[in-house]
Amino acid sequence: MSIAMLITMCLGFALSISIAVSIGLAALLGTWLSNVNMLLSVKEIYTAINKFPLAAIPFFILAGNIMESGGISRRLVEFAKSVVGGVQGGLSATCVLTCMIFAAVSGSSVATTFAIGSILVPALVRHGYPVNYAAALQATSAELGVVIPPSIPMIIFGVSAEVSIGELFIAGIGPGILIAGGLISFVLIYALIKGYGKQDGEGRLPLLTATRQAMFALFMPVIVLGGIYGGVFTPTEASVAAVFYALLVGMVVYREIGLKDLAPILRKSVISSSVILFIIANAGLFSYLITRAGVPDQIGEFLRANLGTPFMFLLGVNTALFFIGMFIETSAAIIVLAPILVPVAAGFGIDPVHLGVIVVVNLALGMITPPFGVNLFAACAVAKISVDQIILRLVPFVLVVLVCLMIITYIPPISLFLRDLMY
């Protein structure tokens, strides 16, 4: 039964059927083959999405879309440029830093790609960077959207593995800074070698002016994360606070959003949220059937028998997740794999929060690797180029993130230092 479900799901992916439908069809097949009562199947689908922390997903998506339409991205670009844009290659470093900041606003890598890429990709091209390099840089930098908190994949991992979302959020800060630092170092060195960006310092605003203009945008992560770790509200309540703050900034402070703009923003947010929750609902039933068949226990025994040390286990997990991320949507992969991996990791003495960060960073790589990298397609749409034009340019960026991933994997304090300090 389990093999038939997996084959059906993979066949759906291969035929370009949507992720949610592919998983749903596989789950329906599993329900029929295992003679599970359909009422029980409906109950499992409902249970999968009837979880309070999941309410944070549509609210963080809505907050990100409001901030995207409210002039926030433009002001963040000017702020980042004033900080790192004064050297050769500074505009490419600006891309990384802006994505890092906007990630702490939207929690979504795709939203970051469109919001920041629509401004910076044309700017990079005007400054002499090849368009495919600019698109590859944007796609990779936006990956920070799922590592820097608030992160939608981290919410999904926390719910699936019953791990504290607040701890996952704070554990993502160190790895996010490490990846951003690695990317900034690479693009600055690469610009010097290739001769790109010699005029990147032109048109920079003074730091004080740029900071004053972006002040309200920069304050949003402070409200969200400060509220969570200050005990003012939960991550779910923080997502609602983020929506109200985004509305206040967009409509009252910057006045770039009117009442007529709210309908398309809400529509876009509802569609994005529905896609994710539809995947979660179907993946919940799929996960239940797989668990009922004893697959997680069998996989756990196999991993314990063949990967006898924590080092080998983490290496095996990273290798598997790298390839899984290429073919399976991040949310679905987390829902299916988290309940399997967490108990096995606990047997090796690996902190589930540390494992959660490893899983999220690894699957984030899948967003920039073919054939199903969503950031890849988003960046190509912004740059108006085909996917085949960007592949070779992506290779060094993927290698940089892989090196950072290995450091995050085998030096746990990068993820856990702040968590241990605060909890």
Image (tube, grey):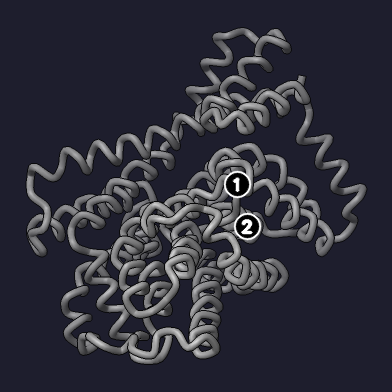
| 244 to 134, vertically: above or below | above
| 175 to 165, vertically: above or below | below
Tag 1's secondary structure? loop
**Residue appearing at x 61%, y 16% in the figure:** 28
Nearest to the observer: residue 66 or residue 396: 396
Q: Is residue 370 left or right of residue 145?
A: right
Nearest to the observer: residue 70 or residue 382: 382
Q: What's the CA distance linking mark 1 and mark 2?
A: 16 Å
Which amino acid, by three-letter code, is at mark 1?
Answer: Pro
The percent coordinates of residue 270 (x first, y second) are 30, 35
The percent coordinates of residue 361 (x first, y second) are 58, 59
**Residue appearing at x 37%, y 44% in the figure:** 56
**Residue appearing at x 33%, y 63% in the figure:** 116
**Residue appearing at x 21%, y 73% in the figure:** 214
- Numbered mark located on residue 51 in the image: none
Which amino acid, by three-letter code, is at mark 2?
Answer: Asn
The percent coordinates of residue 164 (x first, y second) are 52, 52
Q: How many marks?
A: 2
Q: Quadrant of the N terminus?
A: top right
Nearest to the observer: residue 358 or residue 398: 398
Instruction: Residue under label 1, please give it.
Output: 371
| 274 to 4, vertically: above or below | below
Name the image quarter holding residue 404.
bottom right
Tag 2's secondary structure? helix
- Numbered mark located on residue 362 in the image: 2
Q: Nearer the viewer, mark 1 or mark 2?
A: 1
* Mark 1 closeness class: few <14, some 14–19, many ≥20 residues within 10 Å: some
